[in-house]
Image: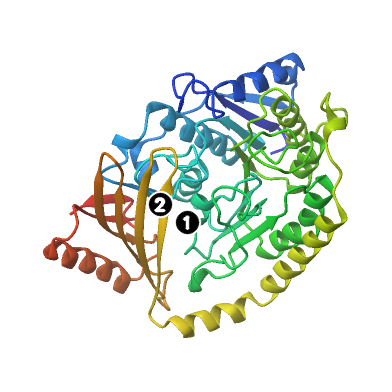
Amino acid sequence: MLNAQRLGLVFFPAFDWAISPTHPEREERLLYTRDQIVEEGLLDMPAIREYKPKIATIQDIERVHVGVPDIASLITNAHLVSAGGAIAAADAVMKKEVQRAFALVRPPGHHAMRIVHGTRGFCTINMEAIMIEYLRKTYGIGKVAIVDTDVHHGDGTQDVFYHDPNTLFISFHQDGRTLYPGTGFTNEMGSPNALGTTLNIPLPPGTTDRGLHEVLDHLIMPILGDFKPDIIINSAGQDNHYSDPLANMAITAQGYARLADTLKADIAVLEGGYSIEDALPYVNVGIVLAMAGMDYSKVIEPNIADCPSQTSSVTHYIKDVIKERQDMWGKKEKLQREAIMKHGEFWQTERSIYYDDEGINELQKERIRLCPHCSGYVIIETKARSSLHYKTAYIGMIPQMACPACLKAAYDMVHKAKKQGNYQHYMVQNKQEDRLEKL
C-alpha cells in the first residue's frame, strides 16, 4: 500500500443516454466537472490516477436486481458502463493500486430497488449495490457501510439491503415530507433480523455546513466506529448544495470537501447534483482533493455570498434528530429482540411504488422469514401498471448464506405459486449459487 497512489478516478459522462435533452440529469453534469479538474491540473498530480470504466455483466446486475420481465430489456449500454465504472473503482482499491477511488459516472442509481419495472428518480439499476455484491463475490468482503449523502433519500439502496445485518445503510437527506421520494423517516430501521442497520437522518430545509458536520461528527462517525465495517462506500450526491435547483439545503463546496476528508470513504460513487455550473465543478474538485489527501482550503464558489445562514430553529431540530438516532443505536439489540417476538416467523409489508420517470404504479407485497439460522428468504409479489403495460411476478430471493431450510422453502413457495398460476412471471434470485432462475 505504501506505493499506491492516493486516489483513482473513473469518468463516464454517458453521451448516448438521456431522459430528455433538457433534463437536469444530463451529460453536462460531468463535462463541467471534467473541464474543471483538467484546468486545475489534477490529473497530472502524482497522487491521482485515472481509470477507464469496465462493462458490467447482466450477472453482476442480477445479483442485486430482478427485472420484470427481465433486466436486459430495461437498461441500456450506458447503465452497464456506469455500473462497470463503479466496479473499476472497487477493483483499483481492492488490488491496492490506490488507497481510495471516486467513480464519477452516470446514469445514477440510488433510487433503483431490488425489483425493477423501469426508471424512477432517474435510476434504473443501483450502481453502489451492484458494486458491493461484486466485492462480496470477488473479494469476500463481509461488513459494508454505505453513507448516502444525496439530498434525496436513497430509497433504492435502503430497499436492497433492508434485510441484511451485514450492511449498514446511513442516509442523511432533506426531510421526506418536503422532497422526493417522500421516504427516509426515522422509523425505517430495517426488518427485524437486521433492525438498526438502516439509519435515516432526515434534515430540515436550510441545513448548512454547520448542521451537516454536527451530524457527521456526533452521529455518523461514532456509529461507523461501533459497526466496524470492512469497507465504507459513499453514495456521493451533491444536490445538498445551496444553489441546487431541485432541493432546499445550504451545503457548500467546503462542506462537501470536509465531509469527504472526515468520512474517508474507500470508494465514492457519484449520485445526484444538478447545479451544473455553480456547484458541481467546485464540489467535485473539493471532494477529489480531500480524497487524495491534498489541500482543498481554497476551493470556494464565486457566488458563495448567496449561501444562507442556518437558523436557530434548524440547529435545534438537528440536535433533536441526533439525540433520537443516538438513542436508537444504543438500544438496537433490544428493539430487534422485541420486533422478532412481535412478528413471529414472518415479517411482511405492503406498499405502493411510483416510477415517476415512466408513470408506472407498482403494488408490492413482501414477506421475509425471520430465520434463527440465517437472514431468511424473501418472497415478493409485484404488480405494475402503466398506460402501456400490466406486469406481474412472484419472486423468491435467497441470501448468500441461506440455511438449507430457507433454500428449500423459497423454491417450494415459488413452485407452489406457479401451479396456482396467478402471475405472469415466476423467478428465484439464488445468491448462494449466483444465478437468477426463471421457473
User: How is this picture coloured?
Assistant: rainbow
Above or below, 316 against 248 in this view is below
**Residue in view at x 44 percent, y 19 percent:** 16
Residue 28 position in % (x across, y down): 59, 20
**Residue in view at x 41 percent, y 49 percent:** 64
**Residue in view at x 67 percent, y 57 percent:** 202
User: Mark 2 packing: few (<14 Cα in 10 Å), some, or many (20+)?
Assistant: many
**Residue in view at x 35 percent, y 52 percent:** 362
User: Which quarter of the image is occupied by the C terminus?
Assistant: bottom left
User: Mark 1 packing: few (<14 Cα in 10 Å), some, or many (20+)?
Assistant: some
Q: Is residue 224 visible?
A: yes
Position of 409 compared to 107: left or right?
A: left
Identify the mark nearer the N-term, 1 or 2.
2
Q: Secondary structure at mark 2?
A: loop
Above or below, 319 against 71 in this view is below
Q: CA distance from mark 1 to mark 2?
A: 7 Å
Residue 341 position in % (x across, y down): 48, 85
Find disc 1 in the rendering and name its residue. 159
Q: Which mark is residue 396?
A: none
In this rendered view, identify the residue nearer to me: 165 or 317.
317
Residue 20 position in % (x across, y down): 46, 24
Above or below, 319 against 156 in this view is below
Amino acid type, callout 1: Asp
Q: Is residue 55 visible?
A: no
User: Which quarter of the image is occupied by the N terminus?
Assistant: top right
Q: Secondary structure at mark 1?
A: helix
Tag 1 and tag 2, C-beta contact below 8 Å: yes
Find disc 2 in the rendering and name its residue. 114
Residue 104 position in % (x across, y down): 60, 30
Position of 103 compared to 15: left or right?
A: right
In this rendered view, identify the residue nearer to me: 309 or 367.
309
Amino acid type, callout 2: Arg
